[in-house]
Image (tube, rainbow, N blue to C red):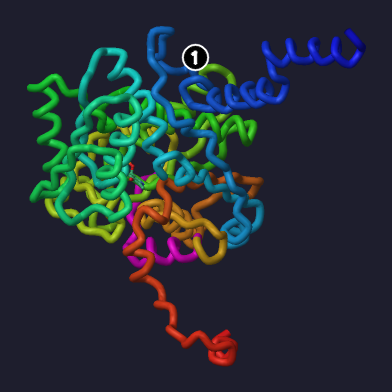
Amino acid sequence: MNFIGRNFIREKSKMKNHPPKARSRREAAEKMSDMCVIKRYKEFLPITDKTPVISLNEGNTPLIKSVYFSRLVGKNAEVYFKYEGINPTGSFKDRGMTVAVSKAVEEGAKAVICASTGNTSASAAAYSARAGIKCIVLIPEGAIALGKLAQALMHGAKVIAVKGNFDEALKLVRQISEKERITLVNSINPYRIEGQKTGAFEICDFLGEAPEYHVIPVGNAGNITAYWKGYKEYRDKNKIRSLPKMLGFQAEGAAPIVKRKIIENPTTIATAIKIGNPASWKNAENARDESGGIIEAVTDDEIMNAYKLLASKEGIFVEPASAAGVAGMLKKSKEEYFDKSKKIRIVCVLTGHGLKDPDRAISSIEKPKIVSANLEDILREI
Ligand code: F0G
């Protein structure tokens, strides 16, 4: 056999075992699947070797340094956005849902159920589809954004629109999950909180410390509970030395924690946080009080202003509920709340993507002008 032939056979047998390109691609793909929150933060999560990992590579979302809002808040302030709209179903819910659905499957569940203002249902539907189990969602009739409804339906969930609000739907799914063998995946399921706390870990891993202030919209109050738990666990493991002040914001017409009473008929354009009796009410108050923070209300006008500024000045499109936190930060900045005697970092969690609620976006801007397909007419408009 000549040299070329021998060489060819050697190369061919190498290729058979591990084609070089394919192998590096596979390694890269394996690394990518390690990006999911369960694998990255396993030591902090109730995961065993028996837990099937139901994941869509959630988490690892960008922490974007703001230019415009840092300047608005002023000297010594650095504002960051934790852009949770980048998650697989477009909201922070995926961090909790990967853990909740994985544990449900581990425990033998054949179906999950939730009440939702939209995002929980989209996430539960997607992760259930991936796990091959049934998903039932109860939504308040006519009160969830179109994108979220489309997601739940496309992922094959059984969607039931209830003539009532979120709080009533939550009461019903709680009763159903007690009676039937169906796992509840609202944030009263502790695995949801466990998964969502990984957002705090990512922020600290990125900054090298906790921020001084953590800004977050509050609806059913699971997420503020989760972030506070995450920061405390990281501090207890000596990963960070200090804890942030937790600043939660509710919408004025749906602000039970601020008003210290259940709101029977909550109203706000931010449908995701249109909640009058949050399940994690007490935990949210604990996060506020233990951290020396606040929970306050912002008006729909303030939410819409922040919503538009985020899109037009930072290039970040969020749904209105996500802008509630940013609106609150702006309000507190005007009130000179922030201690800027030293450098401060403010992290705002942007909980959901703007494309979730296209109707709200379209109704809040000027519609495009219709012009004939003619160069001169178009140039005149530019
Ligand atoms: N932002 C968005 C976009 C949300 O969807 C929610 C809650 C929140 C903020 C508030 O978070 O409830 O943990 O205080 N959405 C739930 C749902 C209620 O059903 O999708 P929270």
- Note whether 280 is above or below 66 in the view shown: above
Q: What secondary structure is found at the residue carrying circle 1?
A: helix
Whether 17 is drawn above or below 166: the answer is above
The foreground one among 371 and 178 is 371
Instruction: Identify the residue shown where x is 25% and y is 38%.
Output: 156
Q: Is residue 126 magenta?
A: no
Q: Quadrant of ligand 1?
A: top left
Where residue 240 sits in the image (x, y, percent)?
59, 26
Whether 299 is among the magenta residues is yes
The quarter in which the N terminus is drawn is: top right
Task: Examine the rendering and report whether any part of residue 235 can be seen.
Answer: no
Specify the quadrant that holds the C terminus.
Answer: bottom right
Q: Is residue 101 left or right of residue 10?
A: left
Identified at 22% across, 28% down, the residue is: 134
Give the class, few, some or many, for how many residues have Cα within 10 Å of label 1's Cα (few <14, many ≥20): few
The residue tagged 1 is 43
Choose between 231 and 19: the one closer to the eye: 19
Q: Main secondary structure of the magenta part?
A: helix
Q: Which residues are magenta?
A: 294-310
| Residue 241 placement (x, y as % from top left) | 59, 26
As drawn, is 261 to the left or to the right of 249? Answer: left
Residue 254 horizontal side relative to residue 192, left or right: left
Residue 213 shows in the view: yes
Ligand 1 under 8 Å from disc 1 Cβ: no
Would residue 316 be found to the left or right of residue 95 on screen? right
Q: Position of residue 173 (x, y in %)?
A: 14, 33
Compared with residue 218, is residue 111 higher up or lower down, i.e. above or below?
A: above
Look at 80% across and 10% down and name the residue there: 10
Query: Residue 249: x percent and y percent?
Result: 36, 50
Q: Farthest right residue?
A: 3
